[in-house]
Amino acid sequence: MFRMRLARWAVGVVAVAILAGCGGSDSNATVGPATTPSTNVAAGAGEPVELAEWQQIELTDAEGETFTFADLVGRPVFMETFATWCGNCRRQLGDTNQAAQQAGDDAVFVALSVETDLDAAAMADYADQQGFDDIRFAVMSPEMLAAINDAFGNTALNPPSTPHVAVAANGAAGEMVTGFDSPEKILSSLGLG
């Protein structure tokens, strides 16, 4: 099973390399999530939903703390994938950081690097140098990369297209959206605008 995922990941990386030259666009596109049955979300967070595999994989953030998206149930989450070399990502992360500042504790903002070999210190330096103080940064493990690819397709692994997903407080993931979104649109996607 791991070899199959690794093969799919390799195909995704090739697709990312090919599509990276395409850049992002101001028009948004959506790719629907594929959910994998698992456990129910915590009580009191709305109607329980079955969480997808990617929501249950443990990550380590730039501060060295471990978490899963299942741990974040109870507040809406804005998740986007990116790469430190990607100019479109920096632009979108700037707007995401503004949305995070406006939302405060009412939502969680997570940026996942597709660069699976990036270490936590380099991730923390990137966030600090860019002034992205209100976003939780983490590097995807190969397992997480494969699960994101399974759920949303190769588009989710193409950083220049600025892929992002709004997740409801009860853990229900929305569609993968690409293109640049303003802070207001990001907040609206989380039910905060």
Image (cartoon, rainbow, N blue to C red):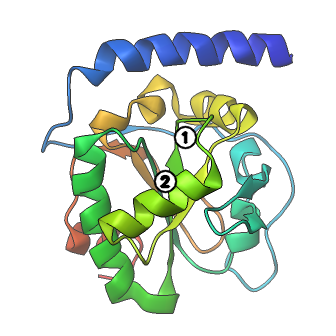
Name which of mark 1 and mark 2 comes first in the sequence.
1
Residue closest to the eye, 137 or 178: 137
**40 vs 156: above or below:** below
At label 1, the amino acid type is Pro
Q: Position of residue 99 (x, y in %)?
A: 31, 76
Separation of disc 1 and disc 2 at Cα?
7 Å
Q: Position of residue 120 (x, y in %)?
A: 63, 55
Residue closest to the eye, 96 or 130: 130
**Splitting the image into 4 quarters, where does residue 15 fall?**
top left
At label 2, the amino acid type is Gly
Residue closest to the eye, 171 or 83: 83
**Splitting the image into 4 quarters, where does residue 144 fall?**
top right
**86 vs 71: above or below:** above
Which numbered marker is on residue 174? 2
- Please give left or right for residue 22 compared with residue 160 in the image: left
Mark 1 touches mark 2? (CB < 8 Å): yes
**Residue at point 76%, 43% (across, down):** 53
Which numbered marker is on residue 63? none
Q: Quadrant of the N terminus?
A: top right
**190 vs 60: above or below:** below
Mark 1 lies on a secondary structure that is: loop
Label 1 CA crowd tier, 10 Å (few <14, some 14–19, many 20+): some
Mark 2 lies on a secondary structure that is: loop
**Splitting the image into 4 quarters, where does residue 61 fall?**
bottom right
- Please give left or right for residue 7 compared with residue 98 in the image: right
**Residue at point 51%, 18% (across, down):** 13
Residue beneath label 1, please?
Answer: 33
